[in-house]
Amino acid sequence: MSYAHEDEAIKSELDKHLAPLKRMNIIDVWQDQKILAGDVWDDNIAQEIMSSDIILFLVSADFNNSEYIWNIEIQKAMERHAKNEARVIPIILSDCLWMDLPYAILQALPKHGKPISNFKDVDTACLEVVNGIYQVVKYLLNQTN
């Protein structure tokens, strides 16, 4: 997951909703909180971006404002997506200008790019996102079989 730390609460909520896919052993979610003391965080993030099959962009104004995300994470992830080495999925967390940014060419979740924060119920929004991710995972698994 590529996200701004200001979006920690919604990231944690979404991660909780991904639990069934984790329990089915079809995904493993990596986030920078898994970096251990003494690890070189930049190396860890780069390694995960370069080895992930699916990269989630948790899009918000804070995400778009992050120099590191903009200059490093988006760049590397979009390059891998363009080479069909990974699938990038933008997940729109909150209202922000994103439709003219590089990742706007990709189908976003929730449907129609409706921000999770605009749903009356966060669980409903997260379920829609997880169902979309699940469809991608099943598709990718079928491609490798």
Image (cartoon, rainbow, N blue to C red):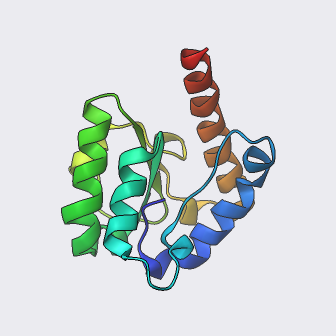
x and y percent of residue 108 in the render?
44, 43
Q: Considering the image in quadrants, where does the C terminus appear?
A: top right
Q: Which residue reaches farthest bottom?
A: 37
Residue 51 can be seen in this image: yes
Of all residues, the one furthest to the front in this rendering is: 38
Location of residue 126 (image quadrant): bottom right
Identify which residue, 120 or 89, lies in the foreground: 89
Q: Can the viewer see residue 121 in this picture?
A: no
> What count of labels does the image hold?
0
Left or right: 136 with respect to 44?
right
Residue 61: image x %, image y %? 34, 71
39 up-or-down from 105: above or below: below
Q: Position of residue 94 (x, y in %)?
A: 46, 66
Identify whether 114 is placed above or below 132: below
Residue at the location (50% across, 58% down)? 115
Residue 131 placed where, x, y %? Answer: 67, 39
- Of the pair 61 and 142, the residue shown nearer to us: 142
| Nearer the observer, 33 or 69 | 33
> Quick check: 38 above or below 64?
below
Residue 34 lies in quadrant:
bottom right
Residue at 52 percent of width and 65 percent of height: 31
Residue at point 33%, 59% (across, down): 46
